[in-house]
Amino acid sequence: MGSKRKMFIFGGIIGIIAAILMKLGNPGNMGMCIACFWRDIAGALGLHKAGVVQYIRPEIIGIIFGAFSISYLTGDFKVKGGSSPLIRFILGFFLMIGGLVFLGCPLRMILRLANGDLNALVGLMGYIAGIFIGVQFLKKGYSLGKNYDQPKIAGYLFPIFAVVLLIFLVVKPAFILFSTEGPGSMAAPVIISLLAGAIVGICLQRSRICTAGGFRDLILIRDTHFLWGILGIFIFTLIGNLVLNFEKFNFGFTGQPIAHNDFLFNFLGMTLVGLCSILLGGCPIRQTILASQGDTDAGITVIGLIVGAAFAHNFGLAASGNGVPTNGKIAVIIGIVFVLILASSIVLNNVKKVSKDSKGVSANV
Amino acid sequence: MCKIVDARGRSCPEPVIMTKKALESNSEGVNVIVDTNVAVENITRFAKSKGYDVEVKENNDDFELNIRR
């Protein structure tokens, strides 16, 4: 029970912080959203031209600083990489497409659910379906291969990127874009967002909470350890919202902030997110934390998320409160089919390799 | 001779899956080598839930988990 209680408390801290950030100005049910925040950063850097979602979210900078510092102090910071980086980039790319069709990462899905948005329940079912499919590939021998030690400097690149983002946020050079209307213009004060991000980064790094890992471990090894963290986020956001944001609590499918009620694509968008998360070994939150603690493969995945967000808006794939554009629906279906083919081909490749290796061993004997 | 599983460099949850598969064919116990704290925690939690004892030894940057009944 000790470890489960710890997970629940770590999750609870994240949940309360999300409710507070929403109270202090972040967009509706978006106290914290890794997909949306990386998308806003992509917009601020001018990688997409959707004027309403451009902002350098201090929470992301805080999360990176928090996770980097605590991993450095505790010995978790290890500079590794070289495990199928291009495949990870592609999976990150499609993960973001799925997330921006649903309108949120798995963390925001929990936050939406904790504020009564039942569309998130449909998303959750899709997410679990995607995780279930991903687990079948894991059982069949799916693997992206080993990683290897990398030059020390490679591990500092991601934290340095966060420093550069912080400079852009403070100096506000003309080439950095900041929304003047829409979700990108809605934000809690910078200092509070930074500190909140740092606390969340520390909690996530220490607890290793992963929204995909929670459901995956339940299916794969009947372990509920990480699910307690997810439950902590849900319950404490719910309590936080009822106390701090009661006037915004809205139970139902309609009138939800930055959400649509296209059931099929809420489901399929999150199916794509769940599937990609399992194939990557972690959801967008976990990838961001790993990237901060020296995992350069996770760093590539985050770049995939950023590029995915840019394409999602440049190609008109991202959904809005008005619904999912046709291009977005096509992209999600292409994404699911493509990722299924990719994973199948990796499994086939690994199975062939294993049987070849074992033949080699028996021949030697 | 005890079966040794080398799960170094594997991303989550592969070390746990490799341990699980090894224990299915060697139910008395296995030794697992990993290189991250997360893998140590996850494998320890899994093995204990299956009724095994786990002893962890640290060698340079690696960890060896001695998993026994």
Image (tube, rainbow, N blue to C red):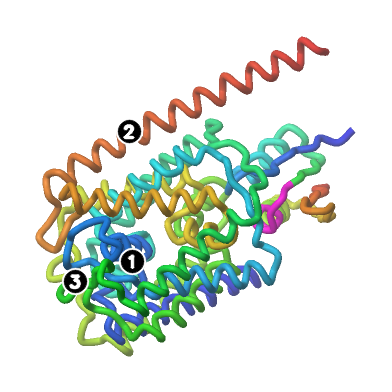
Q: Residue A68 placed where, x, y %?
A: 57, 68
> Residue lying furthest bottom in this view?
A243
Which amino acid type is marked by label 2? Phe
Q: Can residue A126 be seen?
A: no
Q: Residues within 10 Å of mark 1 (few under 14, many from 20)?
A: many
- A332 in relation to A237, above or below: above
Report if residue B40 lies within the magenta region.
yes
Looking at the rendered structure, whether the residues under marks 1 and 2 are on a common chain is answered as yes
- Look at the numbered disc 2 and give the secondary structure of its residue: helix
Q: Residue beneath label 2, please?
A: A338
> Residue lying furthest right in this view?
B1
Q: Residue A151 placed where, x, y %?
A: 65, 50
Residue at point 46% right, 63% down?
A161
What's the distance in space between the residues labelled 3 and 2, CA to CA? 31 Å
> In the rendered image, which quarter is residue A122 located in?
bottom left
- Look at the numbered disc 3 and give the secondary structure of its residue: loop
Q: Chain of mark 3?
A: A
